[in-house]
Image (cartoon, rainbow, N blue to C red):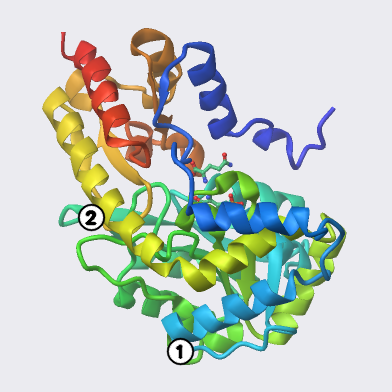
Amino acid sequence: MTVRRLAPHATTIFAEVSQLATRHDAINLGQGFPDSDGPASMIEAAAQAMRDGHNQYPPGTGVTDLRHAIADLELAHTGLSRDPDTEVLVTVGATEAIAGAVLGLVEHDDEVVVIEPYYDSYAATVAMAGATRRAARMVPTDGRYRLDAESLRAAFSPRTRAVLVNTPHNPTGAVLPREDLEQIAALCTEFDAIAISDEVYEHLTFDGVEHVSIATLPGMAGRTLRISSAGKMLNCTGWKVGWVTGPADLVAATRTAKQYMSFTGATPLQMGVAHALRNEQEWIGSLRHSLQARRDQLAEILTGVGFDVVVGQGTYFLTADPSPLGVTDAASWCLELPGRIGVAAVPFAPFTDRYSEEWSHLVRFAFCKRPEVLDEAGRRLQALKS
Ligand code: PMP
Ligand code: GLN
């Protein structure tokens, strides 16, 4: 029944794996969501907002105080000055910001460049817009994932309207260095394309590595939409409070599409997030530190079991290659894993255009769980050794 353009995207890998995890009571290192709450003051601010009667629609662009808090943070972190009324738009998670940007800005005969492996909603959203997806790719270089410049250039054409950029990167955990972003920026300028920059993990970088936004590169502020979300930085993925910032004309196009998808998000939750963005920066800093430790904990566990592991400098995720354990098809192996040993992980394959050997042997593990939960996963994973 589903329309042809969406048929290949019928079920997300996250839904599929989480369902298996629930069925088998497995530890879910597949879908990326934390197992502890965000700051107590954020939850209290949202609850208080409900008790205070803030239970009706917020303005279409989002709660005013939240848009101001986002603009203030943007200035502090990137030096970019945004008008909270015309250059900031609150969305129902980053997912809606991505969809709004693509649906509001891409014509059906346009092309959109994605960089594989890419977050699964990109391909589905480009399909919804009826546009054509052109994939560039990342390559493992000196123990980390970098942009492959040649494939990027090959993916751009005079029909390119936009490139979907994601750093810190899901699923590899890579934080794209400035030089890689400069290559993307140069092509955006050459082909007069916009960058839709998914930066939901912007505050979750490790080892002292700094996140660079492509919006801050010369010539890019006027052609970049910068997307972020409270979900990952404040442990509230279920609140679905995201946002997009950028020049007024690009934000207006995104808003046009967004208005007819959800109109607005949940007022009290936006108020809770506004409170946290203003008052809980230290909490976000300590989350960053604890995630770095948990990344190292999980990497050690997986290496001990026999996986080849590549860690990145950001996000919730690391890359594991189970080939040394005799696994050839990671996609089907991931679907068996919850039932077999009580641990869930997601394969790389659904993040790619080419279900080729380049990616099909890889698995993404999420380390955004409590240390004792990672330890228990480690105990269960030992079963793979025999
Ligand atoms: N982009 C990336 C790279 C993600 O990992 C996620 C999941 N947090 C999203 C977008 C969607 O974010 P949200 O849950 O705020 O819609
Ligand atoms: N962003 C989360 C991840 O990559 C999942 C979000 C979802 O389930 N769509 O795991």
Q: Few, some or many C-alpha atoms within 10 Å of disc 1 (few <14, some 14-19, many ≥20)?
A: few
Please give the name of the residue rendered at 43% of the width and 32% of the height, measured from the top-left corner: 30
Find residue 9 and report its horizontal and vertical position in percent. Answer: 66, 37
Q: Image height check: is 17 above or below 117? A: above
User: Is residue 89 at least partly visible in the picture?
Assistant: yes
Please give the name of the residue rendered at 27% of the width and 16% of the height, measured from the top-left corner: 380
Task: Name the residue that disc number 2 marks.
Answer: 144
Find residue 39 and report its horizontal and vertical position in percent. Answer: 48, 54
Q: Quadrant of residue 372?
A: top left
Could you tell me which quadrant the C terminus lies in?
top left
User: Is residue 161 at least partly visible in the picture?
Assistant: no
Q: Image height check: is 261 above or below 365? A: below
Q: Quadrant of residue 192?
A: bottom right
In this view, the mark in front (1 or 2):
1
Residue type at tag 1: Gly
- How many numbered marks have been drawn onto this rendered protein structure? 2
User: Which mark is on residue 79?
Assistant: 1
Q: Image height check: is 247 above or below 170? A: below
Q: Image height check: is 351 above or below 54? A: above
Calculate the distance from the C-alpha at mark 1 to the C-alpha at mark 2: 28 Å
